[in-house]
Image (tube, rainbow, N blue to C red):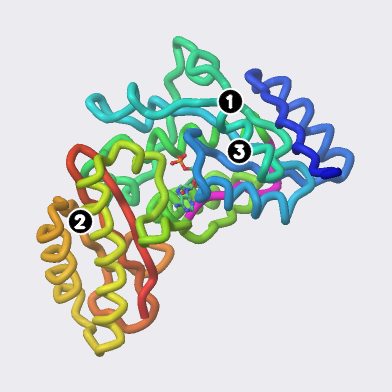
Amino acid sequence: MSMTKTPPLPEVFAEGSALRTRLLAERHAGRTVGLVPTMGALHDGHLSLVEAARRDCDVVVTTIFVNPTQFAPGEDYDRYPRDLERDRMLLAGSGCDWIFAPTTDAMYPSGSETTVDVGAIGQRLEGEFRPTHFRGVATVVLKLLNLAPADRVYFGQKDYQQTVVIRRMVADLNVPVEVAICPIVREPDGLAMSSRNAYLSDNERVQARSLSQGLELAKQMHAAGERQPNAYQAAITELLINAGAEPQYVALLEPGTVTAVDTVEGPTVLAIAAMVGKTRLIDNTTIG
Ligand code: AMP
């Protein structure tokens, strides 16, 4: 007879104060806490962060909160996919202990005013298209860390600029947490996993492959000796447009920063954003 056991469903906390009390008790007892902030609609990219936290920490908490302050009016906040019970099953399979799923009113009660100003980093690249995005991200991450005091907090390399912003905030505001960044998880054809991929029609799904194809092209160009950022930008922009995508930026950056490189000598982050139909997609890799 099969003895496979279904893993226990993670306990769901809606109240930050209850979660905080339990986590402080865990830490007081010497156990380490790993926190994985997400907006739900989980896929294997999210679950890879949970698995990393499971390997490193004694208690793993995933937050599921579609944060309104990181969406601009007209973006996809209202239609962003939400399915807590499905997410809970997936998290059970990845070894998550607890889920923090607060309501919007609990996170932003009326009268909330204070936000985190992330400075110039937040105005470049993504910030040119989403000027208030990183203020919303930094504010909610700081709030989540205050409610769920963790030893380590996990983010995906997929959102490259977000990793730069969060590392900066943690250093600048002396937030007592270690930031861990996990590699991008991709579909078999190269498309970076994203909750937003669910918006893509069959035709757009094919067009969306051009982002990761652009990154691959850059690796070939680097191997062939190309060192001029402009050459990469031109070739990738053309590839995206030919595929039917609408490039927003193709940037070559010093790793860990949003500073453009003059020449592609050492390791260089290549970050791309493009519209595919009405869906905004981002991807990145390191070349060199
Ligand atoms: P989100 O739910 O989109 O806010 O993402 C939550 C976290 O999962 C962020 O740290 C993302 O960078 C990370 N993430 C999203 N997609 C991927 C992916 N394909 N691979 C690795 N991490 C990812």
Indicate which disc, 2 or 3, sits on the residue closer to the N terminus.
3
Q: Tell us which disc is closer to us: 2 or 3.
A: 3
Q: Extreme front residue here?
A: 1
Secondary structure found at label 3: helix
Instruction: Please tell me the numbered disc located at residue 249.
Output: 2
**Amino acid marked by disc 3:** Leu
Which residue is drawn at the image coordinates 29% and 48% (left, top)?
281
Instruction: Please tell me the numbered disc located at residue 90.
Output: 3
Magenta highlight range: 149-156
Answer whether residue 172 is visible to the viewer in this image: no
Secondary structure found at label 2: strand
Quarter of the image for the C terminus: give it: bottom left
Image quadrant where residue 285 sits? bottom left
Crowding around mark 3 (Cα neighbors within 10 Å: few <14, some 14 to 19, many 20+) is some
- Contact between marks 3 and 1 (CB within 8 A): the answer is no
**Amino acid marked by disc 1:** Glu
Residue 109 lies within the magenta run: no
- Contact between marks 2 and 3 (CB within 8 A): the answer is no
Which residue is drawn at the image coordinates 35% and 68% (left, top)?
269
**Amino acid marked by disc 2:** Tyr
Residue placed most toward the observer, 181 or 116: 181
Identify the residue under disc 1.
85
| Callout count | 3
Position of residue 194 measured from the top left corner of the image (x, y, whole percent)? 40, 45
Position of residue 229 measured from the top left corner of the image (x, y, whole percent)? 20, 74
Which residue is drawn at the image coordinates 25% and 89% (left, top)?
225
| Beta carbon at label 1 within 8 Å of ligand 1 | no
Image quadrant where residue 26 sits? top right
Crowding around mark 1 (Cα neighbors within 10 Å: few <14, some 14 to 19, many 20+) is few
Which residue is drawn at the image coordinates 30% and 36% (left, top)?
199
